[in-house]
Amino acid sequence: MNTVTNQQISAPIVRQYEIGGVRYIVKASVSGRASENAVTKINRLIQGDLERKKSQP
């Protein structure tokens, strides 16, 4: 028999944001090893996307 202790399994959270006419669908799950929180990560991803669009001719 397989016994799992101290492990929580939860469904990911899915949210939709619209920023500047762009729709972002965000799927979040919890990790004990994460080095940044969800808000920081979303901001970093959006900023990176905006920078890439600026550099395109």
Image (tube, rainbow, N blue to C red):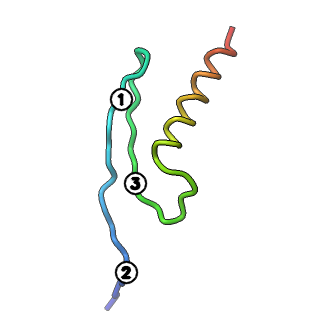
Between 3 and 28, the residue placed more toward the observer is: 28
Above/below status of 47 relative to 4:
above
Tag 3: residue type? Ser
> Residue under circle 2?
6
**Residue occupying the far top of the picture:** 57
As measured in the structure, the alpha-carbon distance from the residue carrying label 1 to the one carrying label 3 is 17 Å
Tell me whether the residue at label 1 lies in contact with that at label 2, contact meaning CB atoms closer than 8 angstroms: no
Above/below status of 31 relative to 46:
below
Tag 2: residue type? Asn
Residue 9: x %, y % from top left? 33, 67
> Residue under circle 3?
29
> Residue under circle 1?
17
Q: What is the secondary structure assignment of the residue under circle 1?
A: strand
Q: Quadrant of residue 4?
A: bottom left
Q: If you read the primary sequence from the N terminus, does the residue marked by circle 3 or circle 2 appear first?
A: 2
Mark 3 burial class by Cα count in 10 Å: few <14, some 14-19, many 20+: few
Is residue 34 shown left or right of residue 11?
A: right
Q: Quadrant of the C terminus?
A: top right
